[in-house]
Amino acid sequence: MKLLVFVTEYSAADSAVDALVEQGFRVTRLASTGGFLRKGNTTLLVGVEDNAVDQAVALASRAAPGSLVITLDLERYERI
């Protein structure tokens, strides 16, 4: 299991979320600010199975080109 963290421009976040949700991914959307100009961004958190990482990254990169993607290993993932 992996946790994908996408940092996107605010203006591209809606299309990235829509693309991921349409393919069955669950997405948590967070407002974030960073960078030199303190520009508004959106951070998307997506928990995926190992074999779905490439699909999720491809969807997000088409919908929000230029996004930063961080992939983290999850030792445990549980929905409560």
Image (spheres, rainbow, N blue to C red):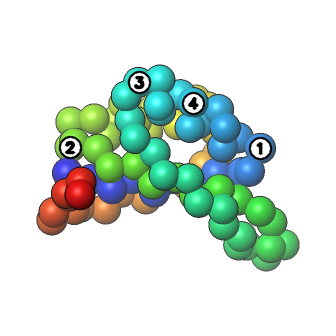
Kindly identify the residue that appears in the image at 40 percent across and 49 percent down.
Answer: 46
Residue with the most extreme front position: 80
Instruction: Identify the image quadrant of residue 42.
Output: bottom right
Indicate which label's residue lies in the foreground, 2 or 4: 4
**How far, Cα to Cα, is label 2 from label 4?**
21 Å
- N-term mark: 1 or 3: 1
Disc 2 and disc 4 in contact, CB within 8 angstroms: no
- N-term mark: 4 or 3: 4
**How far, Cα to Cα, is label 4 from label 1?**
13 Å
**What kind of residue is marked 4?**
Asp
- N-term mark: 1 or 2: 1
**How far, Cα to Cα, is label 4 from label 3?**
9 Å
- N-term mark: 4 or 1: 1
Give coordinates of residue 21: x percent, y percent: 47, 31
Q: Which mark is residue 50?
A: 2
Q: Answer few, some or many: residues within 10 Å of disc 3's Cα (few below 14, many 20 plus, some between 14 and 19).
A: few
**What kind of residue is marked 1?**
Ser
Kindly identify the residue that appears in the image at 77 percent across and 44 percent down.
Answer: 11
**What kind of residue is marked 2?**
Asp
Which residue was labeled with disc 4? 18
**How far, Cα to Cα, is label 1 from label 2?**
28 Å
Q: Is residue 61 visible to us here?
A: no
Which residue was labeled with disc 1? 11
